[in-house]
Every structure is written in C-alpha cells, then in structure tokens.
Amino acid sequence: MQKTSPEIAELKHRIEKEMKRKIKTPNDFTFLSGAIFERTRETMSPTTLKRLWGYIDGADQTRNSTLQILSRFLGFESWEEFVGDIGKDSGSDKVLSPHIEVKELKVGDKVKVSWRPDRRCTFRYLGEEKFEVEAAENSKLKVGNTFYCSLFILGEPLYLARLVQGKNPPVDFVVGNKDGLCELNRI
C-alpha cells in the first residue's frame, strides 16, 4: 500500500495518539520499536518506522507485514480489521475546542493569539475575512501584514490565506504548525 494513503496516515495518527507523543526523532522511532515488541512480541526496526513516517527515504509502498504488526499493536487482529474500523469514523466532526468564527466578528474587533515557543500576535479584523497584523512578537509576521482567515481554533495550527508582507506576492502561511495555538482571545 502507498505510504501516503489516508489509511496509513490514520494508522500513524492513531499510533502517535496511543503513544501520547509525535513520532519525529530517532529516539521516538527507537522507543516505538520497543513499545511494539513489548505489546506484540513482534519486532519492527526503527529504520522501517522511519521509512513509514517519511523521516528517511525509502520505498513508496509499505509491506503488508508491517501494516499487520502495527494494526495488532493498536489492538486489531489485522490490517483489514483496522481499515474497516476507519470506515466507521466519518473523519469529520464539529469543532469542540474553544474557537472564534470570523463571521461573528465586527470590523475593528481584535484577535490575540500565541504559539510556541514564544510567538504572539494581535490581528485587527478588516471585514470580509481579512485581517491586518496589529502587533507581533518573535514572529515572521510583521505589523501591517494582511491575510484572510475564517476560523481560529485553540490547539490547532492557524492557516493564513493570501498573506501579504510588504511588496512580496501573496502566500499561504501556517502559524503554530507543530502544537497549534496556545492562546486565543477576542479583545
């Protein structure tokens, strides 16, 4: 199976959720390899896991035996059972985290956000989903930048569409990519 398939993406997501950590460093892959052996008594090398997660280059296809072991690690009898379980989840859900919907803002309202490690910004709403950066600390965003956004969610990355910085052409930009927003306030 293609290692970029949505099924494999879901498998990796559930493993990270089970491990209560992102799998992204050499130590993480070694730790996961040990956890797989502890739980299933089956071996999987850290190198195989690194390939699957895209940490190192490797084959575009993932072996069925790898998928079977990882499915058993998550408590399923087989890869097929895991894939069947995915079908029970629509993959969509309501936003339950604290959030700000832009349609609820009035022109001139401000939104204050922060994200790790020490980034802070205040955005002023200009109308029609457009914002201007009013204050920025330790960020690539600068006062006067403009962008479009329709939703701010605490704990999730913030996606800025058509970010304009000076005379540069507009770009799409993500803030809080690793851990999401850690502060979200309407002021």
Image: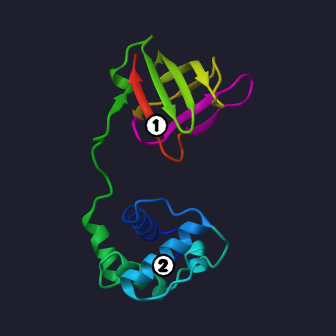
Q: Position of residue 64 (x, y in %)?
A: 46, 86
Q: Which residue is mark 1?
A: 181
Q: Is residue 62 above or below residue 132?
A: below
The picture quadrant where one finds residue 119 is top right
Q: Is residue 155 magenta?
A: yes
The picture quadrant where one finds residue 35 is bottom left
In the rendered image, the residue lying farthest to the right is 167
Q: Residue at x 33, y 22 (%)?
A: 104
Q: Is residue 8 above or below residue 138?
A: below
Q: Position of residue 125 (x, y in %)?
A: 47, 17
Callout 1: helix, strand or loop?
strand
Task: Decide if residue 54 is in sight here.
Answer: no
Q: Residue at x 43, y 31 (%)?
A: 183
Q: Are marks 1 and 2 in contact (CB under 8 Å)?
A: no
Q: Is residue 138 above or below residue 172?
A: above
Callout 2: helix, strand or loop?
helix
Q: Which residue is mark 2?
A: 34
Quadrant for the C terminus in the image: top left
62 relative to 185 in the view: left or right: right
Q: What amino acid is found at the position of numbered circle 1 in the picture?
A: Leu
Whichever of labels 1 and 2 marks the residue nearer the N terminus, that label is 2
Task: Decide if residue 156 is in sight here.
Answer: yes
Q: Is residue 177 magenta?
A: no
Q: Residue at x 61, y 24 (%)?
A: 137
Residue range corresponding to the magenta coloring: 153-174
Of circles 1 and 2, which is in front? Answer: 2
